[in-house]
């Protein structure tokens, strides 16, 4: 018999994460080898671009984990779209991830109305599509090799 509780509990969340990592390490030699190395720690990567007036023109927020750059957020102000700022932010993120954070690959998710073609022009390949997420939209997962293994 089980009692299921619904609550936000930071300590329990951390315990679940720790136990899942233990389980993953026991089942996967790759995860076991990764455990405890610098690549096992999520390392933040944040880049911000300001225009000549000091206003925020764009930014990229992501992190490195498991020799992968995970791009969570990329935004460019409407006034600067098409000026190459998004490409510059991505190039700098890939360079930093490769040269300073030991990443070999990069990944990003984007909706169909956002920028899948933009990422494809940068060399990313669509490897997954989730239809109707959220209802009426399509989510795309794209990846790119950014360094030699």
Image: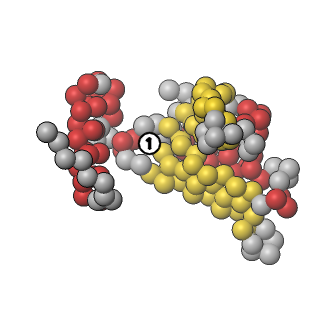
Which quadrant, please, contains the N terminus?
A: top left
Neighbor class of circle 1 (other Cα within 10 Å; few <14, some 14-19, many 20+) is many
State which quadrant residue 32 falls in: top left
Q: How is the image coloured?
A: secondary structure
State the residue at coordinates (52%, 33%): 104
The residue sitting at the bottom extreme is 53
From where the camera sits, is residue 44 visible? Answer: yes
Residue 47 lies in what quarter of the image?
A: bottom right
Q: Eyeballing the image, is 90 above or below 122?
A: below
Q: Is residue 114 left or right of residue 46?
A: right
Q: Position of residue 138 (x, y in %)?
A: 67, 36
Give how far across and how far down residue 31 sits, in percent.
32, 31
Question: Is 28 situated above or below 47?
Answer: above
Residue 123 appears left or right of 47: right
Residue in the foreground of this view, choosing between 98 and 4: 4
Looking at the image, residue 77 lies above or below residue 21: below
Residue for point 55% across, 27% down: 148
* Left or right: residue 85 compared with residue 25: right
Residue 51 vertical position relative to residue 90 in the rendered view, above or below: below
Helix, strand or loop at label 1? It is: strand
At horizontal 75% and vertical 72% (from top left) the residue drawn is 55
Rendering quarter of residue 27: top left
How many marks do you count on the picture? 1
Task: Kindly identify which residue carries mark 1.
Answer: 65
Q: x%, y% of residue 117? A: 77, 35
Q: Position of residue 101 (x, y in %)?
A: 48, 45
Please indicate, yes or no, whether residue 96 appears anywhere in the rendered image: no
């Amino acid at each position: 018999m089980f009692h299921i509780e619904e609550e936000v509990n930071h300590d329990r969340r951390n315990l679940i994460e720790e136990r899942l990592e233990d389980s993953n390490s026991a089942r996967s030699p790759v995860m076991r080898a990764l455990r405890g190395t610098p690549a096992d720690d999520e390392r933040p990567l944040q880049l911000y671009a300001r225009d000549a007036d000091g206003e925020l023109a764009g930014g990229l927020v992501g992190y490195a984990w498991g020799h992968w750059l995970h791009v969570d957020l990329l935004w460019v102000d409407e006034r600067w779209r098409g000026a190459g700022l998004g490409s510059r932010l991505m190039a700098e993120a890939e360079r930093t991830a490769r040269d300073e954070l030991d990443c070999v690959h990069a990944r990003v998710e984007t909706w169909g109305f956002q920028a899948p073609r933009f990422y494809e022009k940068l060399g990313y390949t669509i490897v997954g599509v989730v239809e109707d997420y959220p209802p009426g939209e399509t989510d795309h997962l794209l990846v790119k090799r950014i360094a030699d293994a």
